[in-house]
Amino acid sequence: MNAVDRRLGGAKPLTFYGVEVASRLLLGTARYPSPQIMSDAVKAARASIVTVALRREQARGDTGVRFLELIKALGLRVMPNTAGCRTPKEAIATAQMARELFATDWIKLEVIGNDDTLQPDLFGLVEAAAALIKDGFKVFPYTTEDLVAAERLLAAGCEVLMPWGAPIGTGRGLANPYALKSLRQYFPAVPLIIDAGIGAPSHAACAMEMGFDAVLLNTAVAAAADPVRMARAFAAAIEAGRIAYEAGLMEMRDMAAPSTPVAGTPFFDLDKA
Amino acid sequence: MQLQAGRIAILVNGERTETGAVSLGELVAQLGFSESQVATALNGDFVPRQSRGATLLAADDRIEIVAPRQGG
């Protein structure tokens, strides 16, 4: 398993819908102390994709224009989301509005099913994904670790999946590593991005060591005391985790095994052992 | 509430708004939006930029006018 993944991941560059992706860290643009800190954090993260959203605009307001200028100045690929949408209809209309405004057919598809956990409504997600793919979108569905939902999303035409690590904004890391590992092993060739729930660089490194292709996060950087330094920390952790995965981690064991050779140990007497 | 002749009440971004605009395109212009900098929906359905002029408004229509924002 590991060897196969290594060959797939190591030799071929990471691509989403045929587009080569330079960075395995996708960064959100929300909740930073200032626009300048957001720009600096994105640069420090060496991200090549940033997520953005749509919100209601005030009459005669120019908030959207100013934000778009800031984002364009970064020169990166943008992935709009459908955050806050609760039905396929809302998500589809939001995606269509986003495509027009951001001039991209990439969409981070969120259909939220529960207010407390912000858990995806997997049934609505599959329905919306199928409709959007028919309409020409490249859908990046925000999903759970559910294997059957993953299969349905792939059958609908999704070429990338974004399972959650933990509920959005919780910073709890990988809440269900067993199921995430199963998902990774079950779909070795599908780009899988851990989206949401990451709180610390070690969580991101862990996801990468498990063989996930990339990590999408926002709050962990934006809400740090120093977002720019935290962005650097995440970039380093994700790189370390990825290299470790490609290098092939040792197997875990239950019992100790000496690392120093036993043969030739001074004072060692087999009869007394 | 009594409206002047030729005016209707609609919901724009969730707020009751009286307008004399006949089309969505006219409404967007009257509210002071630059047409290329917002996206629109009418009663939950996306209305592309080029269709706004031909999209006629009716009383109680729900209009969304959105723009880019920070997102995760």
Image (cartoon, rainbow, N blue to C red):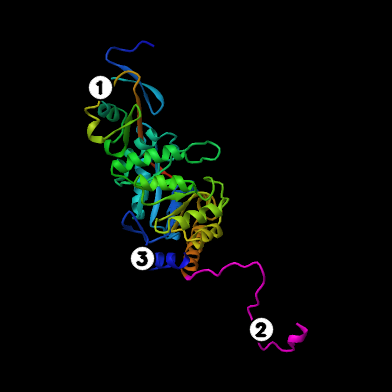
Q: Position of residue A82 (x, y in %)?
A: 40, 40
Name above or below for residue A222 compared with residue A84: below
In magenta stretch: residue B42: no
Which residue corresponds to mark 3? A12
Alpha-carbon span between mark 3 and mark 2: 41 Å
In the depicted view, which residue is nearer to us: A182 or B7? Answer: A182
Q: Which residues are magenta?
A: A247-273
Kind of residue sitting beneath label 3: Lys
Which residue corresponds to mark 2? A262
At label 1, counting other C-alpha atoms closer than 10 Å, the crowd grade (few under 14, some 14-19, many 20 or more) is some
Kind of residue sitting beneath label 2: Val
Kind of residue sitting beneath label 1: Val
In the depicted view, which residue is nearer to us: A19 or A179? Answer: A179
Residue B18 sits in quarter: top left
- In the orientation shown, which residue stands out farthest toward the front? A271
Name above or below for residue B49 compared with residue A138: above
Q: Which-is-in-front pick, marks 1 and 3?
A: 3
At label 3, counting other C-alpha atoms closer than 10 Å, the crowd grade (few under 14, some 14-19, many 20 or more) is few
Name above or below for residue B19 compared with residue A155: above
